[in-house]
Each structure stands twice: as C-alpha cells, then as structure tokens.
Amino acid sequence: MKHIKGYRVQENALMIVEEPGAAYIIGSGYFDFIKLSRSGIIKTALLNLSRQLSFSLSELAQVLHVSERTLQRYADDAKLSADTSERAILLSQLYQRGTEVFGQLENFKEWMRTPLPAFNYQTPISLLDTTFGFQLIQDELGRIEHGLFA
C-alpha cells in the first residue's frame, strides 16, 4: 500500500481511500462519495484505478470528460476537480458491481469490450461518456444478476 499526501492507494483493489475520515470508493455510503468527490481524488489513485481496469489514457480521458493532455499535466499528488473525481468514483463503482456479477474482474472487463445486442451492438465501454450509459450498464448488470437477458 502506498502513502501519498493523506491518501492510501491500495494497489490491488478497486479502492481509493482518503485519510482522515477514511472515505472509501467501495463499500461506503453516498455522503462519503459526495465528500470525496468535492475534495477531489489524487491523480495517482486515478492512475491506479485505470491500470486495474485496463483503460488507456485516451479511454480514461473520454470517460472523465477531460483531455489526455490535461490528465498528463496533473502532478501525481494533485487533486482532481470535483466533476472528474465524481466520474472516477462512478467508474470504480461500476467495475466493482460488474466484478460482483461476473465473479471476476477479468470476465467483466472482457464483457465491457464486447459489442452486445442489449446496447445496439456497441461495446458497453463506449457508453461510459454519459451518465445514461453508466445507468444502462448498471441496469443490464441487474438483469444478468437475476437471470434476465435482453
């Protein structure tokens, strides 16, 4: 586990932890997510998440609604904006949920990159540039979990 200016970044978990107050991406309540979004997550934590999810910098920039160059300019210990932090948290939550439904992160990552009829033969990952896309994927995960396939 790394320690960077008040954050613990757990290397092998989809988790970003802020100290003090220990706001967790996974397993916390909405008020913790709001607080963490407002205070901003650090770039190192975001890059850790990106590696775990096998996102390129370009894919990450598209989901976060920032340019690749903007992401590159941030110092490793810099805090991201509230909007960028919020989208990173949504991404983390989505992949945690997908891992629960599919049993393994690798299985979910493969599903996210497969064109599917439920998404008009688009890849789920291509829908992550809108909150509607996030919700559509979450809804489909619920159907899969309950054995209902579209």
Image: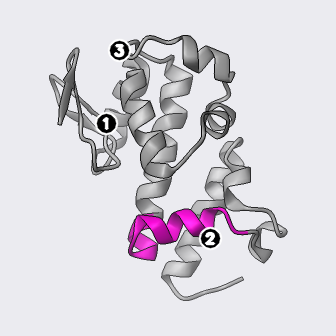
Q: Quadrant of residue 2?
A: top left
Q: Amino acid at mark 2?
A: Glu
Residue 64: quadrant of the picture: top right
Binning the other alpha carbons within 10 Å of mark 2 as few (below 14), some (14 to 19) or many (20 upward) gives: some
How far is mark 2 from mark 3, CA to CA? 36 Å
Quarter of the image with the N terminus in it: top left
Residue 140: percent from the left, percent from the top? 62, 70
Q: Nearer the viewer, mark 2 or mark 1?
A: 1
Q: Which residue is mark 1?
A: 16
Q: Which residue is drawn at the image coordinates 66% and 23% (left, top)? A: 68
Which mark identifies residue 77? Answer: 3
Instruction: Check disc 1 and report its element: helix, strand or loop.
Output: loop
What's under tag 3, amino acid-wise? Asp
Which numbered marker is on residue 140?
Answer: 2
**Residue lying farthest to the bottom in this orientation:** 147
Cα separation, mark 2 vs mark 1, equals 25 Å
Which residue is pictured at 46% across the width and 66% down the height? 106
Tell me which label, 2 or 1, sits earlier in the chain.
1
- Residue 109: image location, x then y, percent: 54, 62
Q: Which residues are magenta?
A: 99-114
Closer to viewer: mark 1 or mark 3: 3
